[in-house]
Image (cartoon, rainbow, N blue to C red):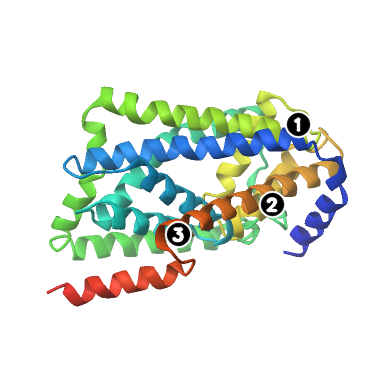
Amino acid sequence: MSAVLHDIRVFFDHLADVGWAALGAALLCQFIKVGCVSRAWRNIIAASYPDSVVRWRSVWGAILARVGVNAIVPARGGDAVGLFIVKRRVEGSTYPTLASTLVALTLFDSVVALCFIVYALSTGELPGSSVLAHLKAFDFHWFFAHIRGTLIAIGVILLVLVLLLLWFAEQLIGFWQRVGLGFRIFSDTTTYLRRVAVWQAADWSLRLTTIFFFLRAFHVPATVHNAILVQVTQSLAVLFPISPSGIGTEQALLLYTFAGKAARTTLLSFSVGMRVTLIVFNALLGFGAILTMLRTLHWRQRVEADRDAVAEHSP
């Protein structure tokens, strides 16, 4: 954390050098990008509940809330907020089905992100496990420094999960049926490509465009190759975020990957400046959406009240 705070100070020292026009273009692309994601998710949900009215503006608000909370709350707490908002707006919806629609939404992202990671690995610009163990700002450097213990722990956790699934298999039949509804969009390939994949392709194009403008704003060489490398570090950072938005992991990977392409202070200004700007921007949009849709910023209380109401009416 001390390393991150130091780099934030470096960012503010270079604030006068920021290209504000390029920064504004990056934020505009970020806003439109979120709209594309919301459109894709809305169509997945509509396919899961064909008899219900699924309004785009409700899903867009939920996506904004999800992104905003994830920007400042680690471990993807925003996903729960987004699901809660959508459940209140889609009649007859259930959390298992809505959660599975989020999984369906991420399948396209996972494939594209994996392709970019393979590309980055082929260029030899990503650090190996031995290097990751010594990147102090990296959220998981301890785990890479103790790789044997980490693998054992992961194996034990997976074994326990498998045993629990087997133990409760019969009771989970109805649950899995509701989960399956979330993947109904894949039953029609043409519909999926036309109503979901095209929006997600636009999302990824805007992601790279956003990064390109951030690179220009902070005077780092702006190329498609460099934009892809930054996107790879972001994908790895949010995989299992510990620090808010995975800022520690992203910063460590960016500094390693871009070493020699620009001055260290420039890279620090870019890595921290881009993430801080996105955190503030996403948080403002997200909590604005929460206030608009829930009439309060105390979203945790609303989630708990909804859960208690469900428990009281359950047999």
Amino acid type of the residue tagged 1 in the rendering: Arg
Q: Is residue 130 visible?
A: no
Residue at 48% in and 60% down: 291
Q: Earlier in the sequence, mark 1 or mark 3?
A: 3
Q: Is residue 75 left or right of residue 130?
A: left
Q: Is residue 246 left or right of residue 13?
A: left
Amino acid type of the residue tagged 3 in the rendering: Ile
| Label 2: few (<14), some (14–19) or many (≥20) C-alpha neighbours in 10 Å | some
What residue does disc 2 label?
Answer: 276
Q: Which mark is residue 154?
A: 3
Residue at 69% in and 32% down: 213
Residue at 43% in and 49% down: 61
The x, y position of residue 10, in whole percent, is 84, 53
What is the distance, in whole Å, between disc 2 and disc 3 at their CAs? Answer: 32 Å
- Quadrant location of residue 262? top right
Q: Nearer the viewer, mark 2 or mark 3?
A: 2
